[in-house]
Amino acid sequence: MEQNTSPKGFRIRTLNYCLILGASILYIFLIHATLQISQKYEHLLLTTADYIACQKSAAQVEEGSDFLTEQVRLFAVTQDLTYADAYFKEAYETRKREHALERLELNVTDAASLSYLQTALDNSNRLMERELYSIKLVAAANGYPESRMDPALLTVELTAQDRLSSPEEKLKKAQSLVFDASYTDAKALIKDNTSYFITNVLNATLDHQATSQNDLELTITRQRIYISLLFIMNVLTFLMIIILVIKPLRIYIKNIRDDRALELIGSYEFRYLALTYNNIYEINAANYTKMRKKAELDPLTGIMNRGAFEQLKERLRIQPLPMALLLIDVDNFKTVNDENGHEIGDKVLKKVAGLLTSSFRPSDFAIRIGGDEFAVVMTDIQPDLKDAVIKKAEQINRILLSGEDGLPRISLSIGVAFSPSGFHDELFRNADSALYIVKQNGRCGCHVYEEPARTL
């Protein structure tokens, strides 16, 4: 029979390559989307951190200006040099306002927003001229030596009128300079500029956050799509395995157990396998039938003879199936022949052959090897059924020993050996060894060969 080498069906290898390629592409997209999510999240955090830094710097500019105002006013009211020292330390050493603006210039790229804070600082510096003049008036009114004051105060010159005014007038003007409406308006302008800066920065931050949030949501949506596609691909893979692999395997196993040809289902590879198996199955079936037809039967007993036994052994050599071999001798058969004649002896042999055929399964083979030697080949049997085999042997011996049909009472000696993978010469030797043990122990029995325990 010619084999069809081009069965129809999907090739598992091709589908597998396609699935691997698709999964790899999706994984690359998924990793890219995950990295983008991480980057956009970091951008959101940085934007928020920048806003907080801007807010903090703006507050420091305003706090520095307010601190100078507080110290100059306290000095104008109390004439306590401690406040003047604190004023000069902030103005020329700590310089909180200038340092805050310098930090912002490094991080803020929005020049328009930054200009508001620079204007606030410029206004605060212009107010310092009034504040220094107020401090100079207080120092002159109290007669503080110039060596006790900050060097910056040396550059401040009082007007001729202020120099000639009384200490009380100097103090009054000093207080007016830092408490009057123009000073308050200038302070309010500083606060307005810092507020404008914060508002602009906040609006810019909110715009950046909204853009980043939209991008982040879009990227997360893409990631969800990729994950969904991967899930669908996994489901399709499982379905492909079930339809193209598992289902055909289950059907093939059932067909093999039922000793039937395989159905052409599943993928291309399984269909090709089925065609190949079916060709071999048909050839083996034809050969087996031919062998059974050509097998010579024993003319006396009607069961298989030694020639058929040799053919059966060759067939079982190439079929690695579990089996058992029973070698059987009729005990003291020569005595039966001598005492009762060959005719009775032949009837005894026929009776033994009939019992062997009827006691075992239809799939088993009863064989007359020669003379009073018989064999039974049991196919598809495991060693855990040895007790059942022994019981069959005991039942046969009970029948033969009963003598109900008028024939001489006889018994059988049976040696049994099991093989997990077909017939081999060792199997025959093992069964013969088991038979020898039965004969050594008085005949009329059954013994199953067991592998000797290995010594360490």
Image (cartoon, grey):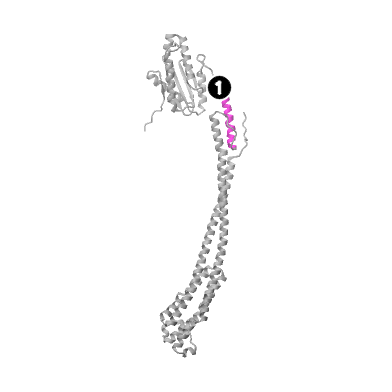
Instruction: Using a 10 Å C-alpha cutoff, classify the residue at mark 1 as few (fewer than 14 neighbours), some (14 to 19) or many (20 or more).
Output: some
Which residue position holds label 1? 291
Asked if the magenta segment contains residue 82, the reply would be no
Type of amino acid under label 1: Met
Q: Image quadrant for the N terminus?
A: top right
Region rendered in magenta: 268-290
Give the percent coordinates (x, y) of residue 413. Answer: 42, 19
Give the percent coordinates (x, y) of residue 399. Answer: 43, 16
Q: Residue furthest front?
A: 181
Q: Residue at x 51, y 62 (%)?
A: 45
Element assignment for label 1: helix
Give the percent coordinates (x, y) of residue 59. Answer: 49, 71
Is 317 drawn above or below residue 19 in the view shown? above
Residue 123 vs residue 384: left or right?
Answer: right
174 and 334: which one is in front?
Answer: 174
Q: Quadrant of residue 280?
A: top right
Residue 62 in view here: yes
Is 256 drawn above or below residue 42 in the view shown? above
Q: Image quadrant for the C terminus?
A: top left
